[in-house]
Image: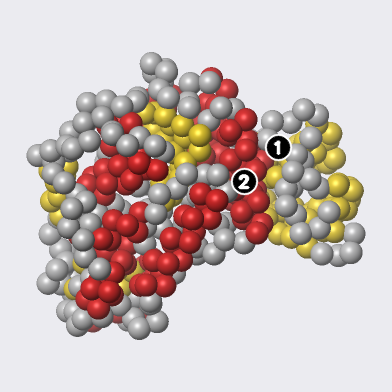
Amino acid sequence: MNFFTKIITLGAVVAASTAAADPFCAALMDKDQLPKKYAKRGPFYADAQSGWIVGADQLKGKYEVTEEVSTLWQAINAEFAERGVTLSVLAAPPRPLFAPSVALPESYDPAADRAAFSAYTEELNAAGIVAPDLTQVVESVSSSDFYFKRDTHWTPTGAYMSAKFLAGSLGVNEPIAADVSFDATYNEKGSLSAVVEKVCGTRPVRETVASPSYAKSVGADALLGNTSAPSLALVGTSFSDRYKTDSYQVAGALAHVFGEEVQNFSASGGGMVGAMEAFILSGALKTGDFKTVVWETPYTTPLTNVSGLRQVLGALQAPETRENIYSGAIGDDWQSAKYEIASDSDVSLQFTTPRVKTGKLSVELYSTTGEKLRIKLVKSERIDPALQSNVWRLSLAALPFKVVNRIKFKLDQTVAGAEIALLN
């Protein structure tokens, strides 16, 4: 099957998106009528005839790249490069671009959304991180097969198309057995179908989509096992670990187009940081097995969150020296430690919380002139318990001020015997 032959224009997609559509029920478009569980994601725009559903949360792309973000990207990439590893990002494109039959609000500009995402991937590449612009798929004859209509994730076809684009971006111009027959099927019950059932009283039918069969891959269960030295690591979210397995065969697609074994370190519900931090702190990069790391990220969680980037960079920074600057309790009230730190690219803070490996740790850094920077570190309980760590690190690279003289911190629970150390 050839996925890249027929071209349609973005203008046609934009025009179609404003056409009238018939929602499954009017309540979907009224945020006040939505159950609390769904209200923050709604309202929901739908077309019952085509079956497409789009939540309002998918219309708010956070793709702006600041100088601080770009600097942190460069530092993260440098840490991988120092270990002989190529870091790439497989960023799922904005899903609303693929739902032309849904009447979206006038406030949503698909052309602007696409341009913002394209600029985001361009900035990633400028920082040295290979990231294909997957909005190019909009112009493919199979664009309608890229995402499920009633689920927020890509289909097995979408995963395969994304893997092919990434392979091309990394210079694999003739992927192993590039064309594949999608002669199997996959049935998706759909998280957005659950919304319709709860709000409208009836559940749309499951989606049956084409699915490939791959021979060369290593599944998510290989995370804790010993494989035959895979050279590519997949680190991602539910896009690569749906229902606690690689339902959409992202690892299989990567293995197919690269002709290499792939080890899947993804974690559903781990957010932007969870799987990557666990991957780094597990020591997986120390084995020397991995030559390429693919960081898969959803359109709703682009790599622009500064706190998350500082957490990942902190995990990567291997300390040569350690100096304890605080010992005591950390709890759900703000506490502080006075200590002067000259921030630079090689300095990080490490919080150690005995027996606490998940939750949220908020940190405030104060300059000598009273400037403040708040950083929120997150450890997801969805990470495999065997890979959870009570170590929380944050990098002090690219701070808006050069000297820190006070640190405040708050955990979402109280733990005794905690420590803060300066790592350099």
In this view, the residue in front, 194 or 229, is: 229
Left or right: 371 with respect to 308? Answer: right
Q: Is residue 210 above or below residue 150?
A: above
- Residue at 79 percent across and 45 percent down: it is 344
- Residue at 73 percent across and 52 percent down: it is 398
In the picture of the structure, the residue carrying the numbered disc 2 is: 74
Q: Which tag, 1 or 2, sits closer to the chain's start?
A: 2
| Residue 285 position within the rendered picture, expressed as x and y whole percent measured from the top left | 55, 27
Residue 140 tag number: none
In the picture of the structure, the residue carrying the numbered disc 1 is: 352
| Residue 120 position within the rendered picture, expressed as x and y whole percent measured from the top left | 49, 59
Tag 1: amino acid: Thr
- Residue at 80 percent across and 29 percent down: it is 321
Disc 1 versus disc 2: nearer the observer? 2
SS at badge 2: helix
Q: What is the spatial separation of the Cα atoms under label 1 and label 2, in whole angstroms?
A: 27 Å
Image quadrant of residue 18? bottom left
In this view, the residue in front, 4 or 156, is: 4
**Within 10 Å of the Cα at label 2, are there few (<14), some (14-19), or many (20+) other Cα atoms?**
some
| Residue 402 position within the rendered picture, expressed as x and y whole percent measured from the top left | 83, 54
SS at badge 1: strand
Q: Is residue 363 above or below residue 34?
A: above
C-beta proximity under 8 Å, tags 1 and 2: no
| Residue 177 position within the rendered picture, expressed as x and y whole percent measured from the top left | 21, 31
Q: Is residue 40 above or below residue 169?
A: below
Residue located farthest toward the left when viewing the structure as drawn: 183
Tag 2: amino acid: Gln
